[in-house]
Amino acid sequence: MYEIVKKEFLSQNIVLMDIKAPRTAKHCYPGQFVIVKMDEKGERIPLTICDYNRDAGTVTIVFQTIGASTKMMAEYEVGDSFRDFVGPLGCKSDLIDESIDELKAKKILFVAGGVGTAPVYPQVKWLHEQGVDVDVIIGARNKELIILEEEMKKVAANVYVTTDDGSYGRTGNVNDCLKALLAEGKEYNHIVAIGPLIMMKFVCLLTKELGIKTIVSMNPIMVDGTGMCGACRLTVGDEIKFACVDGPEFDGHLVNFDEAMKRQQLYKTEEGRALLREKEGATHHGGCGHCE
Amino acid sequence: MADVLKRVPVREQDAKVRVTNFEEVCLGYNMEEAVAEAERCLKCKNPQCQKGCPVNIDIPGFIKEVQTKNIAGAYNVISKYSALPAVCGRVCPQESQCEAKCIRGIKAEPVSIGKLERFVADWARENNIQPKVEAERKGKKVAVIGSGPAGLTCAGDLAKMGYDVTIFEALHEAGGVLVYGIPEFRLPKRTVVKSEIENVKALGVKIETNVIIGKSTTIDQLMDEEGFDAVFIGSGAGLPKFMGIPGENANGVFSANEFLTRNNLMKAFDESYDTPIFRGKKVAVVGGGNVAMDAARTALRLGATTYIVYRRSEEELPARVEEVHHAKEEGIIFKLLTNPTEILVDENGWVKGMTCVEMELGEPDVSGRRKPVVKEGSEFELEVDTVIMSLGTSPNPLITSTTEGLECNRHKCIVADEANGQTSRAGVFAGGDAVTGAATVILAMGAGRAAAKGIDEYLSNK
């Protein structure tokens, strides 16, 4: 069992938790992910690592309550335990293996969208600890969905916040912000973009035009997360890659985002059904035509 | 008087009923049937059956006990050789091993050794009999990676010799392929698999789930930091293969591993579990092995019209005859000498069909089987909404890429001595699918047993 030692709502539906998992905490690096299974009947839910404390043996996860499972997960409190917690899975960020001189020579920008800010944070923090300072754009639909801004400011050179509706920071999406920064004279030659698929797709379209190398972190549907099932396969360039063992980070200019977005829809109806069952209990039988 | 030339038939769930449930197909013998079948054993002076068994079970020895209804005695005989008799009695290909060598089988049907083994193991479970342990503790620690048939056997044998054994399992449940791969209707999880694992634990073996070697820790760290004196790698087969044809990433195309894992490990067939599974209406399973049969029969039970699409003929089907027979009985449609060339995709990215070509058998290839060649102008469309690829696996690099000095062959399988499991690294042994590529439960068990002996020799001389 894996105990929850800290829980905090970062927004109305984004939750941060510290989980006691010494083996994972000891061996994980930025860019990797874990799989959480709440209880006997739960799904295996992949979540990117947001932070870790090797001494305390804890790993920080951040998740948005979008389906029945994550809603239930958000109801767990400090002192409760998850039945299963496995990791670290996937490869660490490529930046981790580069020399400090190489990293310092780069002009790095992180583009974080919504809950994607969580996996960006440990990379920026790790770079800061190596003496490499980077810029970060945090974007979201509105002010409510901007998370980890204060934490990020402590480890980044500059943090630029932008909201689609202008309710906080600059107005516009992350691409508008990126274009504005470049117009203001900023220079970048390495971008890491993590967020919703649609955001990563459009960032990559722009940066391809601009000729700036861009890394993205993919979070497709998974089951085991160890390379056994192939559910997480993606087309990257001409090759089929498994996000769980080959990724989750890939060269964004080679990823087939349209296919990835279609594959994300695979269980949408099943997930929708599970959510309804949870909301309406036994009264929900499906097929009556009265529910959405 | 029963016909001594014929086996005592085993009772099965009726095909019409069983396609609507996930309960076990074969119901096994009762005491009376088992004794009658045991009586058919010729008590050969030079028993060939034992030579056909990869773990060398004293088959005439346990059958003799069944004849006198001393089932506890029979269980003790089997337990000396196998930690998983209830599993093996169900999933071993006996027809090509022990039963193929049975002298009774020369002029009549061979003795139903598998069904007798199963009866003995089930009886022991139902009567709460556990294998005995009486080994002196050796004070040495062995790590076993993977809790499938190879790992469980190796761990059980080492524990019986007195070693302190810990199994590390990457998934949340112990059992490996016995849990995620083989379906409930062939191998019940709660009763059979779980209780055999409990028996291994009763020997003193510790099982730590959710530890993925190569990620959560490494073999070097296990040996240097956690004090393990030797390591056995039984990590299994690995990454599923795909065909590389157009449309393979469409929604509705799954690997057999994914489909079976969702259904078996995650229990998606049971509505009270949260993991979803895509219930297609028309499913094509591509491949002809046991895994393909398992996937097809699972899809059928989830309500689909199901095809097996296989490029060679019935004779070359790698699946067990019993499984093919059961699949046919249940109404699986066999499209033999048929090969897919493209998966057809609708405008939303979902499978809507599969283009196939008919094949005919040509000259024998390197495997000795006649090579299928495309029949000119035979292209046709098969209307399906789901395609399940069951084409085998390629090795998972997680362990080999994080363990220095561990030699692999050109197929990227770990190189290990067949006799004792020794790899190119001192103190590191390996066996099962990680070494051979995808094979059978009993071959993995045989390798686990050989490695346990190898580890004992290594640690005794250290």
Image (spheres, grey):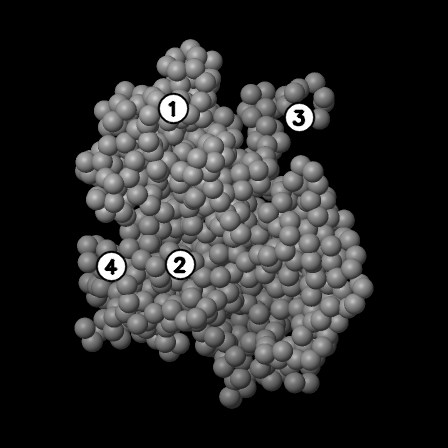
Tag nearer the camera, 2 or 3: 2
Labels 1 and 4 in the same subunit: no
Q: Position of residue B403 (x, y in %)?
A: 30, 61
Residue ID at (45%, 40%) = A252
Residue contact between numbered discs 2 and 1, judged by CB atoms under 8 Å: no
User: Can the viewer see residue B78 in this picture?
Assistant: no
The kind of residue on which mark 1 rests is Ala
Tag nearer the camera, 4 or 3: 4
B279 versus A17 height, above or below: below
Q: How far is mark 2 from mark 3, CA to CA?
A: 45 Å
On residue A268, which mark appears?
A: none
Q: Quadrant of residue B135?
A: bottom left
Asked whether, in this view, residue B300 is left or right of residue B392, the answer is: right
**Quadrant for the N terminus of chain A in the image:** top left
Label 2: how many Cα within 10 Å (few below 14, some 14–19, many 20+): some
Residue ID at (46%, 65%) = B433
Q: Secondary structure at mark 1?
A: helix
Mark 4 chain: B
Which residue position holds label 1? A183
Q: How far is mark 3 from mark 1, CA to CA?
A: 55 Å
Q: How far is mark 1 from mark 4, CA to CA?
A: 51 Å
A211, B392: nearer the viewer:
A211
Which residue position holds label 2? B397
Q: How far is mark 4 from mark 3, CA to CA?
A: 53 Å
B170 versus A110 height, above or below: below
The kind of residue on which mark 3 rests is His
Q: Position of residue A65 (x, y in %)?
A: 46, 25
Q: How far is mark 2 from mark 4, CA to CA?
A: 16 Å
Q: Secondary structure at mark 3?
A: loop
